[in-house]
Image: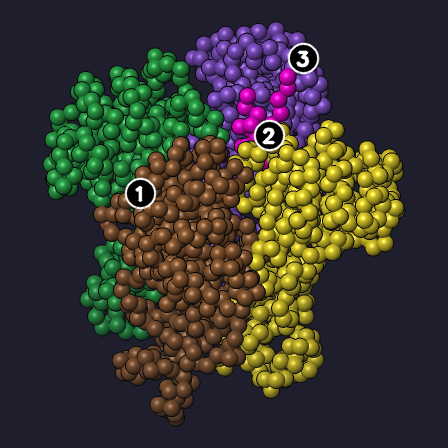
Chain colours: A purple, B green, C brown, D yellow
């Protein structure tokens, strides 16, 4: 929204001559007073900044009455003024001629308030191998959407290569669906494991099914000594034989259950879990030496010692396939050389943040899982480390 | 469109001193006069508001000559002024210095004049089960588009999970088409009914075909004691055996015929129906204890007692697949715990409103059914209940 | 682009008092002088209009030096001023206070200079049958894209129902590709013709193939006494047996060859055709009593008597599938109750116009056929008849 | 960003009368002084230009402190002023009335600084044959995405017709994926070569596989005396039998290896290649009389004599399928009558530039190969030769 203000310099002059510092302290912040001092207390500068604050106050859509002059903070970057009010940034243009000072302001953007800045700007000499090879074992006849969502989410989160390992009978379906992701199937588990050994991270579970055949696949995959994310049907299959988890190297496994899947894994009732989310999540992670991500409003991530509670996300994400997207995001981060606990925290945050951006685009009610994928790129951009500090 | 106005305060002063209240009553509305009073009849305030009205009048693209000063209503929200003229909202910025008052106005948006506000903001702790599991029995070899449109419309209207029940021979085709929707087929009707029992709502009909096999499916599905929408081929199949409808629990069935389908159902000629739309719709709904939605310009929704006439929508929606989208929308609302009569009214309104938004985007002539789905999210957003009243 | 101007009223006053009518005639057009007269030669009005012209001249990106004051035409619609310069429309806002007149102008849009306005606004009570059922016989194994492009172009041009008649072996492929269009195949030609008899228009040819089987299909289809568009492989098949055309009812057939296809049809060499495009097109159309659309820069449409030369379009449309889109557009118009000669002229224009809009979006070099379809909706909107005249 | 400035003409007058030329030389560039001279050193003109420079300086987001008055260059095109500061273009509007001069400026665009301008504006009479028929031999069961990316990239780069030659068993998959591109398969190599002889350019390799069957295909294709691009699996197959390359006509082959593929081709270790990129690339190209494009940061293109180092592109392009897009772009340019060395340089530049535009849209981290294709049209537009010089 535009704001405009015109101020007669002589009026400000009178007030300033009468109240002096008192006037300055009432209207301006310390940094602004320093700036005015640098301009030798020039009355035109003071009038211009005053007009700028008035203009910005008109640009704010809400809450002006609750706004004091000092809430509007005027900065200069390379001599160009701009204003920040809470997390809103405004462009400013100020002009003064002896008699009048005028200022125009315009809303520029919301401050990027990303909780994490964990991604390095990419190195000039990078090649796709540097960003990880990810294999996602997901999908079966009749459940091809979840595999699609997981794999494309991983691709969008920055992986160099994403393979979706599928049963032979959906190879053609998946090949039709994919562009960048590569669908792959194997005629025996040994060949599959040989391939998986070359990966940087592995995810298993979304839409994979619950038959004895899929239990065997899980059994085989969990023998691989690599970081693995287990989700959805993978969790249900695991719950039938927790020894598979016990045998794994400590802290190489991420589990991402919702409450009822967690109940299956740990034996507690859903009600018990609901009232002891953090405590039970911690004790499980400690017992099985894994990273546990327990879904829900305020998702819990824990390795048994550290606990991270994720605040991003919204109830519009309670929609088919949303969890599959999360699995793909975490698998991608895991393959980008981020340690297992952080990859889970960051992934949880990114997923929620992409969902919040999707909500801005389509609203909460209509939000579908593809919308989350479509917004991963923005969420990811916010998490790139700044190269140098801004003033 | 931008509007700008500059007013010399002394000129307003003269007029005001001469005519006093008369001047105020001619130019300003009661609320504005209250505002002026609150400012102690300050002449700058009066001049600023006067300039604002002139600026807004310049921002209106049409109808200025038919516009009186009082049609332009200036409000303040947290001290920030804005104007409403009929259903147009304008941003305003006003500035005054003793000699001059200036005002800039800019069109912001059309008022959201949604007929219904029936959707609650989602609860923080919601999970996808809260928004309904919907099954849509639709599609056959050669008629896969209608199933696709119904199912995705349900997904976009906010359902947590949408299943499209299809014959085995199009399972792969539908799996390729879908991302979030899950295609499912059954080898016998008992298994299908076991699955449907777990659903929150059911729709049957779009592109399902008219053979004896599909009649048997309808027969079987209508034995389920749940809210069911019957459309398209489902209606034609039903018309061969109206006893299926008579046996159902009262007010658990929605029928969505157009005139010729209604003729098949009720035996009246299309001409008779055309001139007695409301009367025949009511008597049918009363006789069969169902909710009837009779399509056409001014769609009629009735349960035999209550009648709702829908005014949203446009003739660009007379295009292949438009009705399939309606079926999906109603099934979705039905699965979100909205009662059967209201779900049909709201669904009819939402469908037309999404079509009106699609018309804004691509025009009436070129509009296709996918455009309606692409605009459901906006129509849905307009129907969320306000959390608190705006001034 | 923004333009702004400030004018001191007293300066204009001096000039006006000195030169009087001479000044007005030099600066203003007749309509503007009438407007000024209506305002009683008020000097503020004159100054405001003067400032407006200066502001508009600054808004023009090019050609100001070649611009006279009279090229800038200021109109009022419901008292709101706007300006037209050649085919550019500018929003205007003018304000005057005794001492100064200021004006702001902003480019609004290019005038819609559609060559044809042939589409009526749709009737409120319309249903999809009113906009035509179109069958497009197109596509074979390995040539599915052309069928897709033709059929979707017809859908976007406003047809109520579009069927793509295909060989059985690509039914699944086409079902996967389509959403609104319905793919259909027939086991024998009699059944196909029974179905085609119910259509409002028929097109045949794109990607249909050149084997004896397809010749038989053409033979059979041309026996149907309906308006038919023949394109691409359909033309080549026809050229082997021109009697099929001779037997048809006069003026129920449209042929859309490019030069080499026309050479095959008519026996003249491509060089002869290139230098006698109009003459040969006319004589062919007269001989075979059909409408001929001869493609190329400046496409010729003729029924042997009337000739229409199409000027829309650009060389970026020289890309795979562009002709298929044209076939679909013409078939759609033909099914909307537009007579056969006009449907071909309008179709040719619409196709070129959609291509010009696509060029604005992606440039000439990169333009592909889907871009043309994506822009049909805009081209179609421009061809809707105005409901009332604008001032 | 907006900038605004107001200047009192009398103030500028005083300064100008005091310092005269010195003032002009300090503030204005030679061209601007010429303009002022043409206006007879009118003080309003000088004030207006001064205000314009102040306004522009406020429009610059960064670096104002490092900006001198002379860095802001004001031009007039048809009397309309605009400003260029480094590679930023600003719209300007200037107004002066004896007492005051005001100026508004607004950022318009970045200057198109395309490294190459090699594409002619298309001729009005062009037909799709003029822009080349391209065949891309790519893809196999399980590797359909790379074929898709190569072929669509060629289509978007402006080819008239693009054929993707594939094994029979993925014909249906590719037909479903494509709209404009035509998938084609052959039952024997002779038929394939007969077809390829009619092409304007050929590419071979992406996702084609490494079995003996594919070696035979390469062997057969390389016998065709046309310009051919060899990439990916095509390179690996070639490396097993370099004689195939030796037998080809000099300078009809482009190879596009990354370092490890180049190692396979030339026998040097990857480390040796990394430190001698240019030298080894030149010697290889000279030895085999081909054009070599050695991928990496600062891609090297050489024919053994000439060397081009490409600077466009970014590390976000280190993602699956990025190289396939490059192959399609080069094949397309090659088919548009651009000589083999230039087609490789231009293609390398265009690919990087499209990737840079994709980065602007989605960021570096999330960038996927489809994003590059989506931005080819912009990169291509920048490379169209200007019709006439701009001032």
Q: Quadrant of residue C16?
A: bottom left
- How busy is the neighbourhood of tag 3: few (under 14 within 10 Å), some, or many (20 plus)? some
Residue D299 vs residue C46, the one in the foreground: D299
Q: Nearer the viewer, mark 1 or mark 2?
A: 1
Could you classify mark 1 by the number of other residues whose Cα lies within 10 Å: few (under 14), some (14-19), or many (20 or more)? some
Nearest the viewer among C207 and D89 is C207
Identify the secondary structure beneath mark 1.
Answer: loop
Q: Mark 3: which secondary structure?
A: loop
Question: In screen coordinates, is C206 left or right of A122?
Answer: left
Whether residue A113 is situated above or below residue A69 in the rendered picture: above
Residue B122 position within the rendered picture, expressed as x and y whole percent measured from the top left: 38, 30
Q: Residue at x 22, y 34 (%)?
A: B261
* Pick the front one: C267 or A347: C267
- Disc 2 is placed on an element classified as helix
Q: Chain of mark 3?
A: A
- Name the chain under label 1: C
What residue sits right under mark 2 in the picture?
D169
Seen in the image, is C149 located left or right of residue D136? left
Residue A170 falls left or right of residue C112: right
Q: x, y percentage for residue D256?
A: 75, 43
Query: Disc 3, disc 1: CB below 8 Å?
Result: no
- Gap between marks 1 and 2, in whole Å? 38 Å
What's the magenta region? A169-187
Instruction: Establish whether labels 3 and 1 are both on one chain.
Output: no
Is A183 included in the stretch rendered in magenta? Answer: yes
């Amino acid at each position: 929204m535009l704001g405009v203000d015109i101020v007669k310099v002589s009026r400000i002059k009178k007030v300033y001559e009468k109240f002096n510092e008192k006037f300055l302290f009432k209207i301006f912040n310390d940094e602004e007073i320093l700036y005015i001092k640098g301009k030798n207390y020039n009355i035109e500068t003071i009038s211009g900044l005053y007009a700028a604050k008035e203009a910005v106050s008109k640009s704010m859509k809400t809450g002006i009455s609750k706004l004091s002059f000092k809430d509007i903070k005027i900065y200069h970057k390379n001599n160009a003024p701009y204003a920040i009010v809470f997390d809103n940034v405004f462009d400013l243009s100020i002009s003064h001629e002896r008699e009048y000072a005028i200022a125009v302001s315009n809303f520029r953007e919301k401050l990027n308030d990303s909780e994490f800045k964990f991604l390095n700007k990419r190195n000039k000499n990078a090649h796709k191998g540097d960003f990880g090879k990810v294999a996602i074992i997901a999908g079966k006849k009749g459940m091809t959407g979840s595999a699609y969502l997981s794999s494309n989410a991983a691709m969008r989160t920055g992986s160099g290569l994403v393979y979706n390992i599928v049963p032979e009978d959906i190879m053609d379906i998946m090949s039709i669906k994919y562009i960048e992701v590569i669908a792959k199937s194997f005629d025996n588990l040994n060949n599959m494991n040989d391939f998986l050994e070359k990966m940087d991270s592995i995810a298993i579970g979304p839409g994979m099914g619950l038959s004895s055949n899929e239990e065997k696949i899980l059994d085989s995959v969990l023998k691989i000594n690599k970081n693995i994310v287990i989700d959805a049907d993978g969790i249900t299959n695991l719950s039938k034989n927790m020894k598979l988890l016990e045998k794994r190297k400590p802290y190489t496994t991420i589990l991402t259950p919702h409450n009822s899947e967690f109940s299956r894994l740990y034996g507690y009732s859903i009600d018990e879990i609901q009232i002891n989310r953090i405590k039970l999540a911690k004790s499980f992670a400690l017992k099985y030496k894994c990273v546990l991500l327990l879904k829900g409003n305020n998702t819990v991530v824990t390795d048994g010692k550290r606990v991270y509670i994720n605040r991003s996300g919204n109830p519009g994400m309670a929609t088919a396939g949303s969890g599959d997207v999360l699995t793909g995001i975490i698998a991608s981060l895991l393959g980008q050389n981020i340690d297992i606990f952080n990859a889970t925290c960051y992934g949880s945050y990114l997923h929620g943040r992409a969902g919040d951006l999707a909500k801005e685009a389509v609203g909460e009610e209509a939000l579908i899982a593809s919308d989350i994928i479509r917004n991963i790129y923005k969420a990811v951009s916010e998490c790139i480390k700044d190269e140098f500090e801004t003033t």
